[in-house]
Amino acid sequence: MGNDLLDDPRVTRHAESLARRGHEVVVICCKTERTPRYERCRNYEIVRVPLENRFLRARTGKAQRARHEPSPNWSRFGVGRMSLARRTVRLLVNLADEAFGFVKAGSVCNANVYVSNDLDTLLPAFICSLILDRNLVYDAHELWTDQLIGLYQESHGYPSWLLSLLNNMESRLVKYCDATLTVNEFIADEMQTRHGIRPDVILNVPRLSEHSPRYFPQKIKTVLYQGAYGPGRGLENLLRACRYLRRDVTVSLRGFGAYETELRQIAESEKITNCRFEGPVPQNHAIAAASRADVGVIPYVPLNLNNYYSSPNKLFDYIQAGLPVVASDVPYLRKVVTRYNIGFLFNAEDIKSIAHAINVATRPATLKRLKNNVEKIRPLFCWEMEEGKYLAIFERLSL
């Protein structure tokens, strides 16, 4: 997997579930400055592979130190206003470097099953499974190639031949997989259209929160965004929507990423005073930290199919924290928010639409009703409901 595992709850949950079932689990991921090379975590092992390319390692490390970024996910795509050629070369070198290291580490493991988490690790997992004649499982957390579309201005994007190359690679390699998974039915449908194979759907949900969240009305209502700061997440529009919020509503941005600098500049230049920035919390404290807010917000802009079909982790974290949700009007968010009446939708490109949804959701009587509805569905969106389906997939592989 292409990060250091400290902020990937899906892989962590999967590893823990397989290990509890009695399987020996080794997670191979990237080595970063904040992580050790090897770690024994509960009942599974973590092997972290350092980048071998000295130039790339230095640039990535420097970028991470400057931005306090927890994982190399965004740095691999290039930072700042890189030229098209440099951004493309950076991505290809990074992917090749990771693939080489992952194949070396994976072949030493001599596993019975190789699980690829996202497209960037599919090729090395395929090579290991081919060399050792083992089973291959592909877990597509998102439409990986589509996330590269629209992240930057057109002159700083990626060439069409690169996107086509990555899509073709996925289409070819997925046919060698013994099982394919993804995070929701909309992405599964899209993958079936593209590749002729429909993945099993395993929702990216946390475990059921141990305590039932309680609502204590506060004079000031807090609307929380919790997660990474990055292109396409609609945070600029969320900030500008603050100008139209009621006086008793404030927005809290709790996260990380290079984009924070730009967001702070927007808040300062436009004199936005009812928004505050907070540092990130460890993944295992995310739900408890979120429960202190009143409403959760997901302002993703549908600038590509990956955003349009997304089912963000924060949606399920908010639900487990007992928070109503105001969110972009995209298929999966629309399905959950409207079916269970737990919040309101907005047009993520219209700041007044965002503000209106927040203002309505935070009215005391409405907020109380929505929170009651959230409490009813918490048991539906938890890992306890998905774990059996996940483990059954590996049982089919005769492990």
Image (cartoon, helix red, strand yellow):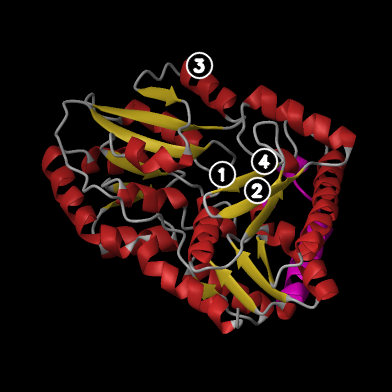
In the rendered view, tell whether residue 126 sits above or below residue 143: below
**Of the numbered discs in the image, which one, if any, rests on residue 150?**
2
**What residue is drawn where x is 61% and y is 64%?**
24
- Image quadrant where one finds the C terminus: bottom right
Left or right of residue 292: residue 314 = right
Q: CA distance from mark 2 to mark 1?
A: 8 Å
- Label 1 vs 4, first from the N-terminus: 4
Foreground tag (1 vs 3): 1
Foreground tag (4 vs 2): 4
Amino acid type, residue under disc 4 in the picture: Trp
> Mostly what secondary structure, the magenta segment?
helix
- Label 4 vs 3, first from the N-terminus: 4
Amino acid type, residue under disc 3 in the picture: Ser
Q: CA distance from mark 2 to mark 3?
A: 25 Å
Residue 250 rendering spot, x and y as whole percentages: 30, 27
**Of the numbered discs in the image, which one, if any, rests on residue 269?**
3
In the rendered view, tell whether residue 318 sits above or below residue 79: below
Amino acid type, residue under disc 2 in the picture: Gly
Left or right of residue 170: residue 270 = left
Amino acid type, residue under disc 1 in the picture: Gly
Residue 277 rendering spot, x and y as whole percentages: 44, 24
As helix, strand or loop, the secondary structure at mark 4 comes to: loop
Instruction: Check disc 4 and report the residue beneath it.
Output: 74
Specify the segment rendered in magenta: 148-174
- Label 2 vs 1, first from the N-terminus: 2
